[in-house]
Image (cartoon, grey):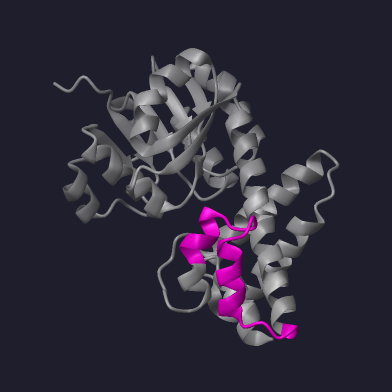
Amino acid sequence: MSEKETVGICGAGRMGSAMARRLASAGFELVLWSRSGVPDELLSETGAQKAHNPAALAGKADIIITSLIDDDAVEDVLTAMMTTSLPGKLVAEMSTVSPKTLRRFSEPIKAKGGSAIDAPVSGGPELIADGKAGLYIGGANADFARFHPVAMALSDRVHHAGSLGMGAAAKVVNNMMLCGYWEVLKEALLTGREAGLPVETMLEILLTSPGASPALRGRIPRILGEDKSVGFPVRGALKDATLFARVADSFGIETPAIDAAVKSYTHCLEAGHGDEDLSAMVRTALEKS
């Protein structure tokens, strides 16, 4: 019998599937459930059990991961999970949602005998697959220590940000920076091109400047239209940017850069590029102008 705890994953989308494959390769036994069904191929690849609903998954797993599209999906799944007892279970909410979402379920989870952390992921499925994603974790020290072996299988950048909800808050801060980065990059490239600079020249200059970032380095072929692979889609970037603006607004923070990014991603989605990589927002703006 494995000494590792059994991990259940609610959500078998691109991120949840990448987590399942990575954790299976690290020797974790898995239980999977998804609203749209778990592909047989994924079950075969990971050797996972399939659960028929969130409550059934909770009964079979020691650590329960939720990796879902938005706040509403997380609330639906956690509400379904509250129909069963959770003795000694650890719920790890790993979606990109409001810091308030998991806090609302903290007491109900405790009443069922479990505990909870929030552990959103920084980076897409390809970084999870390589064990290079970032994890921002909020929760009690004991719960963080318990989750640490799972976290280290997924990430080489594990940060304990503080109490419950602080992981989600840290993810908002990190991804607001990235969201603004792509908007400013679009504006800079459009300006430079009007001044007579080729896009390729500008990107070459930026790569060796203080304005460079790992995110830019990895997406230059996509910006130039040479790579059609998808790290994180436009529709996901728009969903996240809208969340960031909403969280900031709840604190009375004005976000002109994020608001501009929301408009840019909305235009990109409406132009039919919603399933392309988020860098399509930059590429299509260059093609259009």
- x, y percent for residue 87: 39, 15
Kindly identify the residue that appears in the image at 21 percent across and 44 percent down: 46
Which residue range is magenta in the image?
Answer: 194-219
Q: Quadrant of residue 239?
A: bottom right
In terms of depth relative to the viewer, which is nearer, 53 or 144?
A: 144
Q: Is residue 52 visible?
A: no
User: Is 134 rendered above or below residue 255?
Assistant: above
Kindly identify the residue that appears in the image at 27 percent across and 45 percent down: 21
In terms of depth relative to the viewer, which is nearer, 148 or 31?
A: 148
Q: Residue furthest left?
A: 1
In terms of depth relative to the viewer, which is nearer, 218 or 141?
A: 218
The C terminus lies in which quarter of the figure?
bottom right
- x, y percent for residue 264: 69, 69
Kindly identify the residue that appears in the image at 58 percent across and 71 percent down: 203
Q: In which quarter of the image is residue 194?
A: bottom right
In the rendered structure, does residue 149 fall within the stretch colored magenta? no
In the rendered structure, does residue 195 fall within the stretch colored magenta? yes
User: Is 167 rendered above or below residue 188?
Assistant: above
Q: Does residue 204 appear to the left or right of 23 in the view shown?
A: right
Kindly identify the residue that appears in the image at 74 percent across and 56 percent down: 258
Q: In which quarter of the image is residue 53?
A: top left
